[in-house]
Amino acid sequence: MIRDTAAGLRFARSWLRGRADVTVEEILVDRGDRTVPATLLLPSRRGHRPLPGWILLHGTAVPGRAHLQLVRFAKSLAHTGVAVLIPEVPEWKALQLAPGLTVPTVRAAIPALHAVPGIAAAPVGLIGFSFAAPHALAAGADPELAPVLGGIAAFGGYVDLPRTLRFLFLGEHEWRGERFRVAPDPYGRWIVGGNYLHRVPGHTDAGDVARALLALAAEAGARGVAASDPGYDPFKRELAAGVAHERQPLFDLFAPPGGSVPDREAVEALLEPMVDTIRRVDPLMDPAQRLAGVRVPVRLVHGRGDVLIPFTETLRTAERMGPDANARVTITRLFTHSQEDGIPGGVRGVAESARFVRALGGVLRMV
């Protein structure tokens, strides 16, 4: 417990201050099918001991490994005295939902990290954020990777595809009979629609809608402004002008004007065929069945206020893990999908901060 708290405090101080004593270097990693860039972060001050190594996987966003929150997290992580490698997944940066690239990326990153002088020749840690989170966890079931992974941490992931898709449209989720509802961040459904809508039976002519949705998601990634912001409305109208008249309602279902709620009846009619299509086109998008075979320790962290993927998905993830994972969960008000919430005041804030610090320390302790 003391060790966990000390490591977590080092991370937390760096994160909150926005300062980290680290060096940053750009390297190349051979993924097998292509060479990809990667960012290597090392603590500026090193002792004589080899550094533990960590691999960070980014989500589906235009900034890729340069996402500001991800970089800030990586710097704070390296500040604690570890080496951090963030390999780019160009397809995810291009907003392609391609979970099958997770294992090849991790396999390529491990020898690249071990080739750095001063890195411990030992199992490395793996962290997945957002879209990468469940697929990083599933990598722990890979027979070649499991022996070389010391632990996996997942931040803000999903596990139940139908429940997650429903949340993306309606903001509804539940846990053991308790129901929750929020205004969901539409970014997730733009990405899903852009990748799969034109493959759904009855909507195979909707390539124009899919392209418009991906353009909208790319714009949100470039602006760095919440996708729910009404400031996107002019761009939505511009994109809608390029969509066939008969498919305007479909575009509006995914991207209604800021503050508007999608038509429930139309959403309900679309959900089941879309889930079926995603499972047919890419079964790896549904990670639930692979998690029971994870053979390494797992730590799960999710922000209670997350409006892109609900925190109940991480609670559900823990239930799906096998005994070898020794899964531990932290639901926090201090860290959401892409940014931290405000720290609560009073005793509640102290307790929340202490729990978050211990969780971060527990992640670091895995390697």
Image (tube, rainbow, N blue to C red):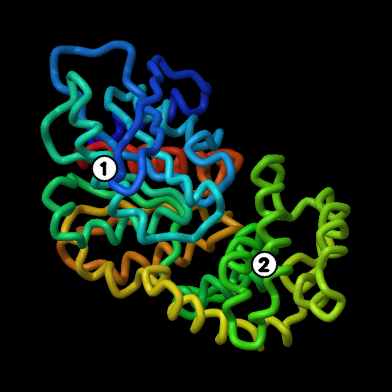
Q: Which residue is mark 2?
A: 210
Q: Amino acid at mark 2?
A: Ala
Badge 2 or badge 1: first in the primary sequence: 1
Q: The C terminus is located in which quarter?
A: top left
**Which residue occupies 49% across, 18% down?**
19
Residue closer to the observer: 51 or 87: 87
Quadrant housing residue 300: bottom left
Quarter occupied by residue 187: bottom right
The residue sitting at 33% across, 12% down in the picture is 44
Is 327 left or right of 204, judged from the image as shown? left
**Quadrant where the image shows the N terminus:** top left
**Distance in Å between CA atoms under marks 2 and 1:** 32 Å
Residue 26: percent from the left, percent from the top? Answer: 40, 24
Residue at disc 2, secondary structure: helix
339 left or right of 209 in image: left
The residue at the point 28 percent across, 46 percent down is 32
- Residue at mark 1: 108
Drawn side of residue 243 relative to residue 179, left or right: right
Label 2 close to label 1 by CB (< 8 Å): no
